[in-house]
Image (cartoon, grey):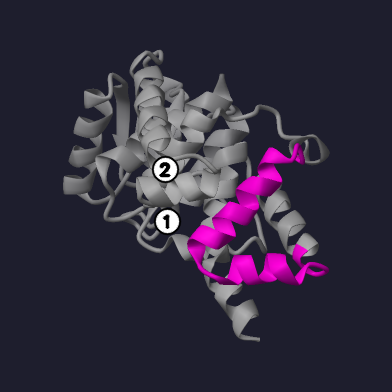
């Protein structure tokens, strides 16, 4: 029972990583289910997964390296450099922990993160719509986006504003808060936008675990408030990676 609870406590964050790694909720959650199914008949695997986040992510990445992507319909394989970046930014592992997860040294992790950042620096600029009702956070995101070489094509504080701006500006990326000024939802705003055009979205929320249950339609890319620039940078790049 203790092992089961230890795994359950960390599953939301593994889902976040799996979705970022595969580009969709469906494929990411599918990977997690595949790992849990494998654990049903493997006590050693259960023990590893219950040992903590490093053990759980290590088991997951071993499954990922096994070539399971084909069975889940994953459209694009993510280079190890990007995996190292996601682990050290979005998942907040140290280089040593990320190295243990990926089966490489901490020095190699640092080299691969540097390579991933160099690739990001060479990416084509995106037109970004920011959906955020707190002015200071909206301004912070605007500055961050522009520092990364992208252009902010609009900022909205409500669902209606977001939908109107998206129709007018045709963004190539959306950054969206969950709770908006008039009580509307950033998720609903994005759903409305997606009816007119397919665009990658990064959601920003103070309560990511509420959107990582795997029990309903949920976002593929999530950033936790308060956020760090490196985390937003990695999330934006990963969303655009799958949009190419």
Looking at the rendered structure, the secondary structure element under dot 2 is helix
Residue 67 lies left or right of residue 125; in this view the side is right
Q: Is residue 214 above or below residue 165?
A: below
| CA neighbours of label 1 inside 10 A, class few (<14), some (14 to 19), many (20+) | some
| x and y percentages locating residue 125 in the rendered image | 36, 16
Q: Which residues are magenta?
A: 39-68
Q: Is residue 229 magenta?
A: no
Please give the residue where the numbered disc 2 appears in the rendered image: 160
- Asked if disc 2 and disc 1 are in contact, CB closer than 8 Å, the reply is yes
Residue at 58 percent across and 64 percent down: it is: 11
Image location of residue 29, percent across then percent down: 67, 53
Identify which residue is drawn at 26% across, 55% down. 226
The mark found on residue 184 in the picture is 1
- Identify the element where label 1 is drawn: loop
Residue drawn at 71 percent across, 68 percent down: 44
Residue 49 is situated, as x and y percent measured from the top left of the image, at: 61, 66
């Amino acid at each position: 029972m203790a092992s089961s609870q230890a795994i359950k406590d960390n599953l939301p964050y593994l889902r976040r990583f799996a979705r970022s790694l595969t580009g969709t909720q469906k494929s990411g959650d599918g990977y997690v289910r595949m790992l849990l199914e494998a654990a049903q008949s493997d006590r050693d695997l259960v023990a590893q997964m219950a040992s903590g986040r490093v053990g759980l992510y290590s088991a997951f990445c071993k499954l990922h390296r096994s070539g399971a992507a084909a069975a889940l319909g994953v459209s694009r394989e993510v280079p190890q450099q990007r995996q190292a970046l996601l682990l050290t930014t979005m998942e907040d592992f140290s280089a040593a922990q990320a190295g243990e997860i990926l089966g490489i040294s901490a020095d190699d992790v640092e080299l691969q993160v540097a390579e991933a950042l160099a690739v990001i620096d060479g990416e084509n600029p995106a037109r970004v719509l920011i959906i955020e009702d707190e002015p200071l956070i909206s301004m912070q995101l605007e500055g961050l986006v522009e520092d990364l070489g992208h252009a902010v094509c609009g900022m909205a504080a409500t669902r209606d504003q977001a939908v109107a701006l998206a129709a007018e500006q045709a963004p190539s990326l959306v950054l969206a808060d969950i709770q908006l000024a008039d009580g509307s939802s950033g998720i609903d705003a994005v759903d409305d936008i997606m009816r007119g055009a397919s665009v990658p979205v990064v959601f920003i929320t103070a309560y990511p675990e509420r959107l990582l249950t795997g029990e309903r339609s949920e976002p593929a890319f999530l950033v936790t408030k308060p956020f760090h620039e490196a985390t937003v940078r990695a999330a934006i790049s990963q969303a655009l990676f799958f949009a190419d």
